[in-house]
Image (cartoon, rainbow, N blue to C red):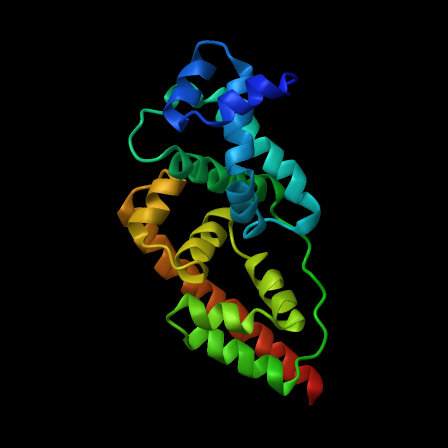
């Protein structure tokens, strides 16, 4: 951490490009400026993809990876966007190492839960998803369903359908081809629909 307040204030006024150049020259304090500048942004990205109890560890891992790979930043696009890609790929790595989880136990579905599922699976926009996500029961069901997908399917589904990214944006952040994103996003959505449909069927049988 920067110990000299005056030095920190001077550093905080420099641009991303200058800060990066100073980091590459061995000035570790300059990287702290980048961390402070983008910690809110990175936290927001990570919060969208990992459980709350894992948030801090994944958040810290993002900046460790960013520091270790800063020599690969080629000034193509903003540093913020480059950092977003690292954050998303770190979340993807988290799920790759975590899978497969045991199924989350789900209670009986109420009529409102069924309506939520029908709405989300028929929706084509992220707005509908976010409006429905406010229901705690619905979040539980969705978390369980996403847990049945592969790490790749989960990430592309969250980015494209839940966060509304274009195929090109998701491909850039994940380091995949646009074609791969488009194919996988289509397949992952259908897989999620199948998982939820099966769950609805089992829940309906239990209520009979």
Q: Find residue 143 and report its horizontal and vertical position in percent.
A: 61, 61
> Can you name the residue that lies furthest to the top here?
25
- One can see residue 194 in this view: no
Residue shown at 47%/56% (left/top)? 158
Q: Find residue 8 and report its horizontal and vertical position in percent.
A: 57, 22
Considering only vertical position in the picture, is 44 above or below 142?
Answer: above
Instruction: Pick the quarter of the image with the C terminus.
Output: bottom right
Query: Is residue 39 toward the left or the right of residue 152 in the image?
Result: right
Residue shown at 63%/73% (left/top)? 135
> Can you name the residue that lies furthest to the bottom here?
208
Query: Is residue 87 toward the left or the right of residue 52 in the image?
Result: left
Query: Is residue 76 toward the left or the right of residue 114 in the image?
Result: left
Considering only vertical position in the picture, is 97 above or below 65?
Answer: below
Residue shown at 56%/69% (left/top)? 133
- Identify which residue, 67 or 103, lies in the foreground: 67
- Identify which residue, 3 or 115, lies in the foreground: 3
Instruction: Pick the quarter of the image with the N terminus.
Output: top right
Q: Find residue 111 and report its horizontal and vertical position in percent.
A: 62, 87
- One can see residue 123 in this view: yes
Q: Find residue 55 and report its horizontal and vertical position in percent.
A: 64, 44
In terms of image quadrants, where is residue 140? Answer: bottom right
- Identify which residue, 197 or 21, lies in the foreground: 21
Query: Is residue 26 toward the left or the right of residue 169 in the image?
Result: right
In terms of image quadrants, where is residue 81? Answer: top left
- Identify which residue, 148 or 162, lies in the foreground: 162
Number of numbered callouts drawn:
0
């Amino acid at each position: 951490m920067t110990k000299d307040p005056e030095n920190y204030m001077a550093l905080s006024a420099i641009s991303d490009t200058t800060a990066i150049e100073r980091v590459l020259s061995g000035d570790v304090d300059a990287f702290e400026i980048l961390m402070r500048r983008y910690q809110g942004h990175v936290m927001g990205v990570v919060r969208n993809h990992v459980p709350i109890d894992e948030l801090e560890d994944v958040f810290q891992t993002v900046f460790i990876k960013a520091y270790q790979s800063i020599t690969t930043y080629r000034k193509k696009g903003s540093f913020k966007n480059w950092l977003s890609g690292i954050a998303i790929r770190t979340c993807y790595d988290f799920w790759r190492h975590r899978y497969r989880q045991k199924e989350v136990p789900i209670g009986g579905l109420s009529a409102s839960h069924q309506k939520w599922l029908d709405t989300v699976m028929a929706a084509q926009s992220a707005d509908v998803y976010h409006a429905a996500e406010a229901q705690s029961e619905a979040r539980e069901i969705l978390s369980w369903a996403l847990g049945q997908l592969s790490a790749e399917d989960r990430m592309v589904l969250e980015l494209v359908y839940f966060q509304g990214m274009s195929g090109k944006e998701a491909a850039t952040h994940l380091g995949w081809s646009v074609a791969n994103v488009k194919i996988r996003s289509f397949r992952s959505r259908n897989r999620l629909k199948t998982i939820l449909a099966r769950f609805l069927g089992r829940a309906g049988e239990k209520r009979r």
